[in-house]
Amino acid sequence: MAIIIDGKQISADIRAEVAVEVEKMKTDHGLTPGLAVVLVGEDPASQVYVRNKESACHEVGFNSFKYELPADTTQEKLMQLVDELNCRDDVHGILVQLPLPKHLDSSLVLLAIDPNKDVDGFHPVNVGRLAVGQATLPPCTPAGCVELLKRSGAELEGANAVIVGRSNIVGKPAALLLLSENCTVTIAHSKTKDLPGVCRAADILVAAVGIPKMITGDMVGEGATVIDVGINRTAEGLVGDVDFEAASQKARAITPVPGGVGPMTIAMLMKNTLKAAQMR
Ligand code: NDP
């Protein structure tokens, strides 16, 4: 039976580590990291995410600035707010909660954020820095996957890492991060031939697809470490992209859903905001 990687505990450990650094920063430099979160409209899921981010900020000792704009906010108004936040000295991180209402162009908004305050790690400058191996603010979910691997004792150097999914927010950056950890990386996607065979060869298998339980037990190699990024709402509740019961018979270690990758995203957001403040 596999070790269950406890994302809740690891995320709490990271937030506690960030809190210690924040305390030091306040004492040594009189500086408090600040995160601005911008929410446009009233999407209930986004409201929950923003509330959680706000309470994580308070927990680690950050200043938190919340901007709730009406659903009919114009592109110009939103860009104006981003500009103001870019210029503020007390704001070290800016996060615009996605998805935005349909009339707004999110790529223009993300481009407008100062890359050094882009704590989501989505700005092309930060993606480029990641690609060429420069210090950057990495996207939170894939960075959380790497942290889970490291803290659960997975051997990364020389490991065969297979990432299923090539999205810009999870799959691709996860591949770049694992490459920088000296894994031998394969990115699989919907056109990959013999996906089960590719997955079985993985020492580290990251599933970021969005299809409930699509990674079956026979796709997992003996002793692999399995990271399930998927969050799928089904009749049986929240399930991942991995068939947890079957995969845990083969894996060395595996993340559950919920309680695996999910809680890591906010912890890594806190880490990125601290890093952005330190870089300043
Ligand atoms: P996307 O829909 O953007 O990407 C899905 C990827 O899966 C695509 O690259 C697609 O390939 C690939 N894919 C689809 N079907 C198959 C298939 N049959 N075989 C192999 N590959 C396939 O999803 P995201 O990356 O945004 O999210 C993935 C999952 O992670 C979702 O469940 C999402 O909810 C979850 N998620 C969780 C987060 C967290 O905090 N825990 C944060 C972000 C996402 P192709 O490119 O060829 O179409």
Image (tube, helix red, strand yellow):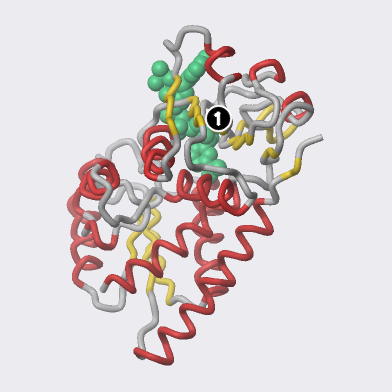
Q: Please say if 93 is above or below 24.
A: above
Q: What residue is rendered at 44% in x and 50% in y?
A: 140
Up the image or down, 224 lies above or below 118; here it is above
Q: Quadrant of the N terminus?
A: top right
The percent coordinates of residue 90 (x first, y second) are 30, 78
Disc 1 marks which residue? 207
Report which quarter residue 254 is drawn in. Answer: top right
Determine if residue 110 is in view: no
Q: Position of residue 103 (x, y in %)?
A: 28, 38
Residue furthest toward the top?
Answer: 193
Residue 215 found in image quarter:
top right
Closest to the observer: 134 or 182?
Answer: 182
Q: Is mark 1 on a helix, strand or loop?
A: strand
Q: Quadrant of residue 255?
A: top right
Name the quarter where the C terminus is drawn: bottom left
Q: Which residue lies furthest to the right in this view?
A: 1
Looking at numbered disc 1 in the image, what kind of residue is underneath it?
A: Ala
Q: 97 left or right of 164?
A: left
Q: Does the Cβ of the disc 1 residue fall within 8 Å of ligand 1?
A: yes
Q: Which residue is drawn at 39% across and 71% down?
A: 65
Q: Point out residue 117 in the picture as x, y percentages from the top left corner.
A: 28, 62
Front residue of this view, candidates 101 and 87: 87
Indicate left or right for 214 with 121 as reference: right
